[in-house]
Image (spheres, rainbow, N blue to C red):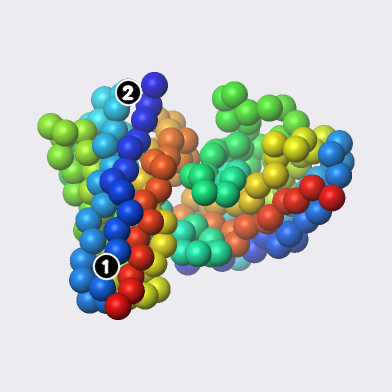
């Protein structure tokens, strides 16, 4: 199985800050990567697909980039409602696998 | 609007089986697959398997092969996930997830989750 490693595991930032999370795949996955947001007690929500495409209805402050083995997810200006855990997911190979998550907190 | 509504929380003893349902509405059930993903407390999401609701074909995670069975009832627009020989490590929230029409691996609709607790 492809291993997905996110960093950092947790992050504390202030409202308005630019926040970046990275995700590294154990092998080349081209652009087959999605990003999800999960709030406590809720199901994940798709934000970014195919590494850089914004899901319909998702605010433009969210973005993704990367290809191959190294990817990043950015919130350009952190809002209070962005407090959540974020997961990357590869789907180049079956089974699809997820990163361990990055927990984002407000400073 | 698309909705996936799952059955309620379950408490099972080790060695037992559990069956979780996922009732779909707001779209043509047989036009999409349905995946199952679980999340143990404090852990990452884990893909379990999927069913093509149109032709009933399934594929499972190798790690759960032999213990997980995914089925569907087209007349009820409902998918089911049954997990047998339960262990304490199976304690988790179980989600059904419907993929996007453009990609079987982009999960854009999720059920609310079903907590399964395995405890003696």
Q: Is residue A87 above or below residue B24?
A: below
Query: In the image, which disc is placed on residue B12?
Result: 1
Q: In which quadrant of the rendered view does residue B49 lie?
A: bottom left
Q: In the image, is B100 to the left or to the right of A78?
A: left
Of the image marks 2 and 1, the number of the one nearer the N terminus = 1
Q: Residue B23: give x, y in percent of width and height.
A: 26, 37
Subunit of mark 2? Answer: B
Tell me the crowding category of disc 1: few under 14, some 14 to 19, or many 20 or more residues within 10 angstroms, Cα based.
some
Residue at image point 79% right, 47% down: A106
Q: In the image, is A33 to the left or to the right of A91?
A: right
Badge 2 and badge 1 in a common chain:
yes
Disc 2 or disc 1, which is closer to the eye? 1
Instruction: Give the total number of marks visible in the rendering.
Output: 2
Q: Secondary structure at mark 1?
A: strand
Query: In the image, which disc is placed on residue B26?
Result: 2
Residue at image point 30% right, 78% down: B120
Real-space CA distance between mark 2 and mark 1, rounded to the nearest whole angstrom: 32 Å
Q: Secondary structure at mark 2?
A: loop
Q: Residue B79: give x, y in percent of width and height.
A: 24, 43
- Visible residue check, residue A2: no
Q: Is residue B115 above or below residue A36?
A: below
Q: Residue B61: give x, y in percent of width and height.
A: 35, 62
- Visible residue check, residue A15: yes
Query: In the image, which disc is placed on residue B47?
Result: none
Q: Is residue B25 above or below residue B4?
A: above
């Amino acid at each position: 199985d492809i291993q997905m490693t996110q960093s950092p595991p947790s992050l504390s930032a202030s409202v308005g800050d630019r926040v970046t999370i990275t995700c590294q795949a154990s092998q080349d996955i081209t652009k087959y990567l999605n990003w999800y947001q999960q709030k406590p007690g809720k199901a994940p929500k798709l934000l970014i697909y195919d590494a850089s495409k914004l899901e319909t209805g998702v605010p433009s402050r969210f973005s993704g980039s990367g290809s191959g083995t190294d990817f990043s997810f950015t919130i350009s200006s952190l809002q209070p409602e962005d407090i959540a855990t974020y997961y990357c997911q590869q789907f180049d190979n079956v089974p699809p696998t997820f990163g361990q998550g990055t927990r984002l907190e407000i400073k | 609007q698309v909705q996936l509504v799952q059955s309620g929380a379950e408490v099972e003893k080790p060695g037992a089986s559990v069956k979780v349902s996922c009732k779909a509405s707001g779209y043509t059930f047989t036009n999409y697959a349905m995946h199952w993903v679980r999340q143990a407390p404090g852990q990452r999401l884990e893909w379990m398997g999927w069913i093509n609701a149109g032709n009933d074909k399934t594929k499972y995670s190798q790690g759960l092969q032999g213990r997980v069975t995914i089925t569907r009832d087209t007349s009820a627009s409902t998918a089911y996930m049954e997990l047998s020989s339960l262990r304490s490590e199976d304690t988790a929230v179980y989600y059904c997830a419907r993929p996007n029409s453009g990609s079987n691996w982009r999960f854009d609709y999720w059920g609310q989750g079903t907590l399964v607790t395995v405890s003696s």
